[in-house]
Image (cartoon, grey):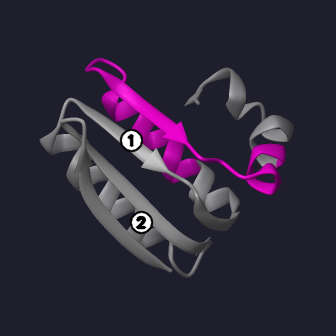
Amino acid sequence: MTIKVFEENGAPVIAPEGKIDHVTVKEFESKMNELGEKYDSLVLDMAGVEYVSSAALRAILNASDLLEEKNGMVLKNVNNKVMEIFNITGFTDYLDIR
């Protein structure tokens, strides 16, 4: 997994590529927390994400909770496979997915 971080329309964007699983989740979670503490909002661009494990779901939910009292977190470009995981787990009820 690789992680790109850039700014888009004044908001920080984190764009992981590859699988977010038990092997890669620490790096992903660390980057999410770092940006979540530094900024009031965050965009998670999921275009390059092939797979998310339960550990990745936990990291995404933790980051969303961290930003909940600020301006929040938006997920975008979620592919059908990952969206199916979000639907099955009920994450679509808690996350702002566009």
Which residue corresponds to the image point at 21% horizontal and 54% vertical from the top-left?
A: 34
Magenta stretch containing residue 10, yes or no? Answer: no
Q: Nearer the viewer, residue 29 or 97?
A: 97
> What amino acid is found at the position of numbered circle 1 in the picture?
Val
Whole-percent x and y of residue 65? 41, 30
Task: Identify the element where label 1 is drawn.
Answer: strand
Q: Nearer the viewer, residue 92 or 33?
A: 92
Please say if 84 is above or below 2. Answer: above
Which residue corresponds to the image point at 61% horizontal and 65% vertical from the top-left?
A: 49
98 vs 87, left or right, is left
8 vs 75, left or right, is left
65 vs 55, left or right, is left
Disc 2 crowd, CA 10 A, few/some/many (<14, 14-19, 20+): many
Which residue corresponds to the image point at 32% horizontal and 39% vertical from the top-left?
A: 42
The residue that label 1 is drawn on is 43
The residue that label 2 is drawn on is 28
Please say if 89 is above or below 50. Answer: above
Q: Are marks 1 and 2 in contact (CB under 8 Å)?
A: no
Magenta stretch containing residue 61, yes or no? Answer: yes
Which residue corresponds to the image point at 51% horizontal and 46% vertical from the top-left?
A: 60
Whole-percent x and y of residue 88? 86, 39
Circle nearer the N terminus (1, 2) = 2
Q: Which residues are magenta?
A: 58-84
> What amino acid is found at the position of numbered circle 2 in the picture?
Phe
Task: Identify the element where label 2 is drawn.
Answer: helix
Whole-percent x and y of residue 84? 84, 45
Q: Quadrant of the C terminus?
A: top right
Whole-percent x and y of residue 35? 23, 49
* Residue 21, picture quadrant: bottom right
